[in-house]
Each structure stands twice: as C-alpha cells, then as structure tokens.
Amino acid sequence: MTRWNLVISDDTNRAVRSYLARTGGKKGDLSRFVDRAVRQAIFWETLESVWRRNQHLSPREAQALADEAVMQARAGRS
C-alpha cells in the first residue's frame, strides 16, 4: 500500500464525507472511494484515447482488429 497526501477543496471534502456518512461509511471507506474514483478515471481516459485513435476505422475494420487481437491472446496462452 502507498499513502498519498492530497489537497482537496473544502466543498469536495464535505460532499464526499457526507456521501460516505449517508451510505454507512466505515473506517477506510474514504481510501476505497478515492481508489475506485482514480481507477474509473484511468479506465475512461484510456477508453477515450482508444476511441480517438481508432475513429478512422469502420465498425467492420475495428471488429476485425479486435478479433485478431483476441486470437493472438488466446494463442499465447496455449
């Protein structure tokens, strides 16, 4: 585990802590909440990057590339 020191606005701090209190938050829930939020942000940023990178492809071309990648991944596990 790694510890972070973060600077968060007072409004965000109140909103998150109020949310956690309303949902029955317990010790460690703030860390789990931040961890989940960061993972979601990374996922969506990655997804948007892939969409931008492949926007020139037709749906058929994109599917063909995905199928090829899946076949290669499965072949690598065998």
Image (cartoon, rainbow, N blue to C red):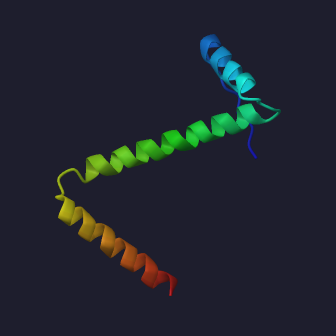
Q: Residue at x 35, y 46 (%)?
A: 49
Q: Is residue 36 left or right of residue 62?
A: right
Q: Residue at x 67, y 23 (%)?
A: 19
Q: Quadrant of residue 68?
A: bottom left
Q: Position of residue 76 (x, y in %)?
A: 47, 82
Q: Quadrant of residue 28?
A: top right
39 vs 63, nearest the viewer? 63
Q: Position of residue 31 (x, y in %)?
A: 72, 35
Q: Position of residue 18 (x, y in %)?
A: 69, 18
Q: Position of residue 14 (x, y in %)?
A: 67, 15
* Image mark count: 0
Q: Residue furthest front?
A: 23
Q: Residue furthest top?
A: 10
Q: Residue at x 45, y 80 (%)?
A: 74
Q: Residue at x 39, y 73 (%)?
A: 70
Q: Residue furthest bottom?
A: 78
